[in-house]
Image (spheres, helix red, strand yellow):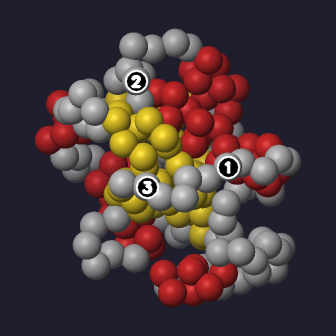
């Protein structure tokens, strides 16, 4: 199975359904999971591309990161010149301190009509495109996190799926939690459907 897709291959494969022998990204999964058409914006002010990974353990848990009540899978924003694979490999080394074999399995593209801009009291129409990978590891190394992550109490966690869902049910004063929970729920449900977790 090929697992080293270039961004160009990902773009061409976005609308191809994932097959057992040929795993490709597809776009979007929102309608696949909810089984109903989800409206999208005809225009947006900002587009963010990210890469994240589901890293499972032999203990039946998933590695997560947590900042200010937001539970997020390891990963982050693509930097200039990076492919999604470059991004996720860099982020996994920074956040988890490990190198792990990763396989792409889905790309989520979704829209916020009222995304709260960081450090501003304004909202914007935003498109988020997130490339997801999966892999496994039973240990963590030394983390190398950013000043932003340190400021917002970045923590590495290890949870069962039940514990993750329970944490998503908790309320928070953090306005970003509803956005991160929505994305996390979508990708976990899709991963369960495909037998990844």
Work out whether residue 190 can be spotted. no
Where in the figure is residue 174, as x and y percent of width and height?
A: 38, 20
Task: For mark 3, give the secondary structure.
Answer: loop
| Position of residue 155 in the picture relative to residue 58 (left or right) | left
Query: What's the CA distance linking mark 2 and mark 3?
Result: 20 Å
Q: Nearer the viewer, mark 2 or mark 3?
A: 3
Task: For mark 2, give the secondary structure.
Answer: loop
Where in the figure is residue 159, as x and y percent of width and height?
A: 57, 31
What residue is rendered at 28% in x and 67% in y? 79
**24 or 40: which is nearer to us?**
40
Rendered view: 124 above or below 86:
above
Where in the figure is residue 95, as x and y percent of width and height?
A: 33, 49
Q: Quadrant of residue 164?
A: top right
Q: Which residue is mark 2?
A: 175
Which label was assigned to residue 39? Answer: 1
Q: Which residue is mark 3?
A: 44
Residue lying at the far front in this picture: please name it: 42
Give yes or no for contact between labels 1 and 3 (Cβ–Cβ under 8 Å).
Answer: no
Q: Nearer the viewer, mark 2 or mark 1?
A: 1
Task: For mark 1, give the secondary structure.
Answer: loop
What residue is rendered at 40% in x and 76% in y? 83
Mark 1: few/some/many CA within 10 Å (<14, 14-19, 20+) = few
Which label was assigned to residue 57? Answer: none
| Position of residue 181 in the picture relative to residue 90 (left or right) | right
């Amino acid at each position: 199975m090929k697992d080293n897709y270039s961004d160009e291959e990902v773009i061409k494969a976005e609308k191809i359904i994932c097959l057992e022998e040929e795993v490709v990204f597809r776009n979007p999964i929102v309608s696949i999971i909810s089984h109903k058409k989800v409206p999208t914006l005809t225009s947006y002010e900002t587009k963010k591309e990210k890469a994240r990974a589901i890293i499972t353990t032999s203990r039946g848990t998933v590695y997560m990161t947590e900042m200010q009540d937001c539970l997020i899978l390891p990963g982050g924003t693509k930097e200039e010149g990076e492919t999604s694979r470059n991004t996720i490999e860099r982020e996994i080394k920074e956040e988890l301190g490990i190198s792990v074999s990763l396989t792409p399995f889905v790309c989520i593209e979704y829209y916020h009509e009222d995304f709260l801009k960081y450090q501003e009291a304004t909202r914007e129409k935003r498109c988020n495109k997130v490339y997801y990978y999966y892999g496994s590891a039973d240990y963590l190394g030394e983390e190398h996190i950013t000043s932003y992550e340190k400021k917002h109490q970045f923590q590495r966690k290890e949870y069962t799926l039940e514990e993750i869902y329970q944490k998503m049910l908790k309320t928070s004063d953090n306005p970003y939690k509803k956005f991160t929970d929505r994305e996390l729920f979508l990708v976990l449900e899709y991963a369960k459907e495909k037998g990844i977790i």
